[in-house]
Image (cartoon, rainbow, N blue to C red):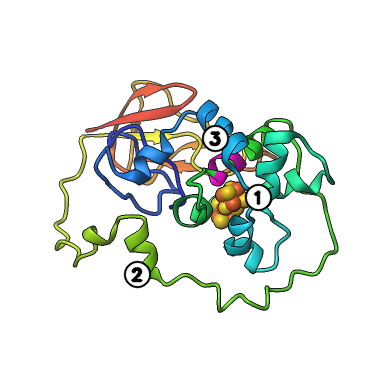
Amino acid sequence: MTGNLLPSLDEPVLKTTKGLTILPEGHPLIVKRKVPLTWTLRQARSACTQCIECTLACPRRLLGHAIEPHKVMRAVSFGVTAGLEAVTCALLCPECGLCEFYVCPQRLLPRRVISEVKAEFQRRGVRYPKTDREIRPDPFFEARRIPRQRLSMRIGVWRYEREPAVFVKAKPPRVVRLRLKQHVGAPARPKVKEGDEVKEGEVVAEPLPGDLGAKVHASISGRVVKVDQIEIVLEAG
Ligand code: SF4
Ligand code: SF4
């Protein structure tokens, strides 16, 4: 339930791609991801009952972190009425989606709201404040764990659970697109230009000295056919 919704299967695989889940366009998981932000916020304001179920079930909170999604919902709807930690706790959320795909009885989208709050903090360079608070798992941690099968039924993916197809080695691609930002930190800077020949494994982009980032290597041997701010495109030679 974590991860991003890809606009198409032509999106390149990145270093951070752990797997792809392909679902029909009308699947509830996809439909929920496409709800416009304005609707999400309007629904939060009008329908969140502050039942705190999202907070009680939040796996991050159960591990001992000070995250309370119901307070983020309240702050976004009515303004920050208590301490700022009611919203900065959004920075602790790994966006597992349990609160929105499984828990909320009002079918609201707390993950989406939190994700927007987090993005705004990140744009403004706000970090989670340092704290010496002890991280101690909730005493009900074990009792509140959700059985995987029940989760699978509730979010509607049980029908796709089957033995995986036998892996058939794919043909090597003719064209590969190498994104310059596939990691935390700054995008890598290209070391090649259009028309250059590269060998498989060669470094084609790397971070500037002192920048946090990672090198990008050619995954095939061939010719560089495009270089821009976003990616390097190689064609097999
Ligand atoms: S579970 Fe839903 S209704 Fe309850 S506090 Fe969270 S967002 Fe609001
Ligand atoms: S998405 Fe919801 S349940 Fe998951 S960590 Fe964030 S607040 Fe908690």
Q: Is residue 111 magenta?
A: yes
Pick the front one: 132 or 235: 132
| Mark 1 C-beta closer than 8 Å to ligand 1 | yes
Q: Where does the magenta region start and end? A: 110-114
The answer to whether residue 22 is seen in the rendering is yes
Q: Quadrant of residue 52?
A: bottom right
Q: Nearer the viewer, mark 2 or mark 3?
A: 3
Distance (Cα) linking label 1 and label 3: 13 Å
Residue occupying image coordinates x 15% and y 46%: 171
| Earlier residue among tags 2 and 3 | 3
What's under tag 2, amino acid-wise? Answer: Gln
205 left or right of 69 in image: left
User: For mark 3, what is the residue?
Assistant: 43
Q: Is residue 227 above or below residue 160?
A: above
Q: Is residue 71 above or below residue 135?
A: above
Q: Quadrant of residue 218?
A: top left
The answer to whether residue 94 is seen in the rendering is no
| Earlier residue among tags 2 and 1 | 1
Q: Nearer the viewer, mark 2 or mark 1?
A: 1
What's under tag 3, amino acid-wise? Answer: Gln
Helix, strand or loop at label 2? It is helix
User: For mark 1, what is the residue?
Assistant: 50
Circle 3: is it few (<14), some (14-19), or many (20+) Cα within 10 Å?
Answer: some
